[in-house]
Each structure stands twice: as C-alpha cells, then as structure tokens.
Amino acid sequence: IPIPNEATCSICLDYFEDPVSIRCGHNFCRACISQYWRKSDTNFSCPQCRKIVQHRNFKPNRVLANVRQLEFLKQERDEVLGFKRSGEMKTQKLLVSALVTH
Ligand SMILES: [Zn+2]
Ligand SMILES: [Zn+2]
C-alpha cells in the first residue's frame, strides 16, 4: 500500500508527529510548524501553499495521528512476517527496532 502524501509532513518529510492542522487546511507536525514559525512574528505563512495565516493557531489532527499509528503497526506486522520467513538477519532487525521503539 503506497503511503498517501497526506500522511507525511512536508517539512520533515516523515510521518506526522503530533499532527496539527492550520487554517489553510494543511497539516504538519506540531514541532515542525512551531519551529518554522519561530522565525516570524507577524505573518505566518504555510510552508506548503505559502498562504498567509493571520493567527498562529492550529488544531490537533486526530485522523492523521491514527494514520501514523496504523502505518507503524503495519510496519511492525511486516517485520514479524519477515522474521518468520527468513531467519537471523530479521531477528536482529526486530531486536533493534524493539530496542528503539519500546
Ligand atoms: Zn514534520
Ligand atoms: Zn497551506
């Protein structure tokens, strides 16, 4: 299943981390957009469509948060399946990912 563009942040190009929507309807990680807007204090422009957003506000995007979680689960499932198919390499990878993520 290809990853839809909407599921990734156009600033860090990764899955959304604590996704938020801004006025124009684009979504970014909370940390990314905060960082991006730190430079300006009057006109906040959308990094994606360049639209000026008058108010520096954003709302959490639960849908995208779920997408990220689903992708994460899918990835874990793939790793487990891979592990079942082909031995040791995958075991190590699985151990590494377990160490990183848990
Ligand atoms: Zn981001
Ligand atoms: Zn925008």
Image (spheres, grey):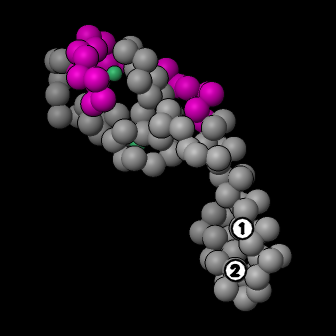
Q: Are marks 1 and 2 in contact (CB under 8 Å)?
A: yes
In the image, the segment drawn in magenta is: 44-65
Q: Is residue 12 magenta?
A: no
Classify residue 14 as left or right of residue 80. Answer: left
Can residue 80 be seen at all in this image of the molecule? Answer: yes
Q: Position of residue 47 (x, y in %)?
A: 27, 30
Q: Position of residue 66 (x, y in %)?
A: 66, 36
Q: Which amino acid lies under the numbered mark 1 shown in the image of this protein?
A: Glu
Can residue 29 be seen at all in this image of the molecule? Answer: no
Q: Residues within 10 Å of mark 2 (few under 14, many from 20)?
A: some
Seen at 23% across and 34% down, the residue is 38
Among all residues in the image, which is located at the extreme front?
Answer: 1
Q: Is residue 60 magenta?
A: yes
Seen at 23% across and 15% down, the residue is 52
Please identify the quarter of the rendering in which residue 24 is found.
Answer: top left
Q: Compared to 99, does 102 lie above or below? A: above
- State the mark number for residue 31: none
- State the mark number for residue 79: 1
Ligand 2 visible in quadrant: top left
Which of these two is toward me, 59 or 3? 3
Seen at 29% across and 39% down, the residue is 35
Among all residues in the image, which is located at the extreme top?
Answer: 54
Please identify the quarter of the rendering in which residue 53 is found.
Answer: top left
Q: Which amino acid lies under the numbered mark 2 shown in the image of this protein?
A: Lys
Secondary element at tag 1 = helix
Secondary element at tag 2 = helix
Query: What residue is shown with label 2?
Result: 90
Classify residue 6 as left or right of residue 95. Answer: left
